Amino acid sequence: MVDQVKVVADDQAPAEQSLRRNLTNRHIQLIAIGGAIGTGLFMGSGKTISLAGPSIIFVYMIIGFMLFFVMRAMGELLLSNLEYKSFSDFASDLLGPWAGYFTGWTYWFCWVVTGMADVVAITAYAQFWFPELSDWVASLAVIVLLLTLNLATVKMFGEMEFWFAMIKIVAIVSLIVVGLVMVAMHFQSPTGVEASFAHLWNDGGWFPKGLSGFFAGFQIAVFAFVGIELVGTTAAETKDPEKSLPRAINSIPIRIIMFYVFALIVIMSVTPWSSVVPEKSPFVELFVLVGLPAAASVINFVVLTSAASSANSGVFSTSRMLFGLAQEGVAPKAFAKLSKRAVPAKGLTFSCICLLGGVVMLYVNPA
């Protein structure tokens, strides 16, 4: 009876109140890749290598292995009912309204906080080229730009994430290829260290920091995967989700091996793990060794776009989560209304207003 009522209600609802499936397979595949590759790989891998040594390779493999099954489970549940818009919907349906309320609002809050951090990070990366740029003005401009672009159509979001992901892929593949060439040519650093895969096991073995270092690597490495669930929040706006979602999710193990494991192997083969500086990006250091002009600028551009991708994902996912919560009656009804472009404009605006908290903090305390 309840299902019949829902069907009638859906039939009577105006067409513009339904999210449009405008994200193609191309968008979904790159969104999945972009979500699996966080800024932490580019900027935080030096810290994780110094903590765990070569065992960090196994850390990323274990995290990726676990997340694969989490994503498989989420994909199965989302495809079991195409009316589900996100994991909050099936949590509410299968566990009860309290579960949907809790997961939905905590997810929204987490992404708002993460979005603030991303906006601040984007400002910091931009100051690499524009040191005189005001912190709070730059952050405000970023938020306004993200809001404007996301108010257009969901396809605009898909295109932005597609190109953001492409930039990250090109950077990582370039590092792997350059690193392999350096190893094959027995490249010697200015300090006389020769590039070799033997660095992985000759400098204290695979676990030079013991189990304590191995486990310490998890707490930092796991943050590199923040956003991997984003492919699930796009389910309601994906064309042919029965084909696109399984392809994206099932390829996660290959992507983890290719982008994380291979990159780390190459980094520690060119530079022994004990020589990696925690405060510096291994990507920058490797390209500097090669003599790449403006290596720091290139990687700074990559991490800036990576942070922009994360912030963009946060704005998208929070608005969709508010839309779903409003439809369930646990958020203001205004958030359940869509614009003429089938975008939850009020949810987008509210989430971006919340991001202004980061701007206020930068204005009050620029340091």
Image: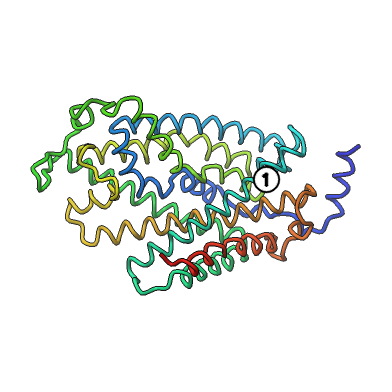
In which quadrant of the rendered image does the C terminus lie? bottom left
Query: Residue 111 at what x, y percent from top left?
Result: 57, 51
Relative placement, left or right, of 365 versus 335 is left
Question: At 69% from the left edge and 45% from the top edge, which residue is drawn?
Answer: 85
In which quadrant of the rendered image does the N terminus lie? top right
Q: Quadrant of residue 177?
A: top left
Q: Which residue is mark 1?
A: 104
Q: Quadrant of residue 2?
A: top right
Q: Where is 37 relative to 146, above or below?
A: above
Q: SS of the residue at dot 1?
A: helix
Question: At 28% from the left edge and 33% from the top edge, which residue is drawn?
Answer: 53
Query: Residue 129 at what x, y percent from top left?
Result: 33, 69
- Residue furthest toward the right? 1
Query: Residue 152 at what x, y percent from top left?
Result: 61, 66
Q: Amino acid at mark 1?
A: Gly
Question: At 66% from the left edge and 44% from the top edge, which residue is drawn?
Answer: 86
Query: Residue 312 at what x, y percent from top left?
Result: 53, 57
